Image (cartoon, rainbow, N blue to C red):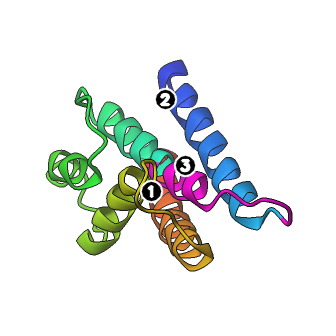
């Protein structure tokens, strides 16, 4: 595995740990941040997968758009499109005034992240 891929994995893992920590905090949990970092984890893993398959990842945060690029390169990764859209929306919408994530939304984002993370790590470590 290249140093670049290792760096993407390290950064993705940092986002995963941060998402879980924020959602599980007993004092002042930041559910907005949990949703954001759950999306960031998957974004970074998807970009790492694109790199693994010799494709340059675009500068986008839209997980569905990343999947469109990854789909023909990696037949082993077939996520539910609704999950990709949920994470993308949760990462963006909850970062600005007018909407805030609650515990259930953060837990949903982390559950989706955990499932997608497992699938992507399996592909990346082959």
The percent coordinates of residue 77 (x first, y second) are 31, 62
Magenta-drawn segment: 26-39
Can residue 36 be found in the magenta stretch? yes
Q: Is residue 31 left or right of residue 72?
A: right
Mark 1 or mark 2: name the one nearer the start of the chain.
2
Q: Quadrant of residue 79?
A: bottom left
Residue depicted at 37% across the width and 45% down the height? 46
Q: Is residue 58 left or right of residue 95?
A: left
The percent coordinates of residue 39 (x first, y second) are 45, 53
Mark 1 or 2: in front is: 1
- Asked if residue 77 shows in the view, the reply is no
Q: Quadrant of residue 12?
A: top right
Q: CA gap, disc 3 to disc 2?
A: 19 Å
Of 23 and 80, nearer the camera is 23
Residue carrying label 2: 5
The percent coordinates of residue 86 (x first, y second) are 34, 67
Mark 3 or 1: in front is: 1
The percent coordinates of residue 96 (x first, y second) are 42, 48
- Up the image or down, 118 lies above or below 44; here it is below
Mark 3 or mark 2: name the one nearer the start of the chain.
2
Of 119 and 85, nearer the camera is 85
Residue placed farthest to the front in the image?
A: 98
Residue carrying label 1: 94
Residue depicted at 44% across the width and 44% down the height? 45
Badge 3 element = helix
Of 90 and 68, nearer the camera is 90
Can residue 90 be found in the magenta stretch? no
Residue carrying label 3: 37
């Amino acid at each position: 595995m290249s140093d670049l891929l290792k760096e993407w994995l390290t950064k993705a893992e940092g986002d995963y740990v941060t998402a879980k920590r924020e959602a599980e905090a007993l004092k002042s949990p930041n559910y907005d941040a949990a949703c954001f970092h759950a999306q960031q984890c998957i974004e970074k893993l998807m970009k790492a997968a694109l790199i693994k398959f010799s494709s340059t990842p675009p500068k986008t945060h839209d997980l569905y758009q990343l999947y469109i690029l990854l789909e023909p390169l990696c037949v082993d990764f077939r996520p539910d499109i609704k999950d990709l859209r949920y994470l993308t929306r949760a990462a963006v919408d909850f970062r600005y005034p007018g909407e805030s994530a609650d515990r259930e939304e953060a837990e949903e984002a982390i559950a989706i992240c955990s499932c997608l993370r497992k699938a992507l790590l399996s592909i990346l470590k082959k």
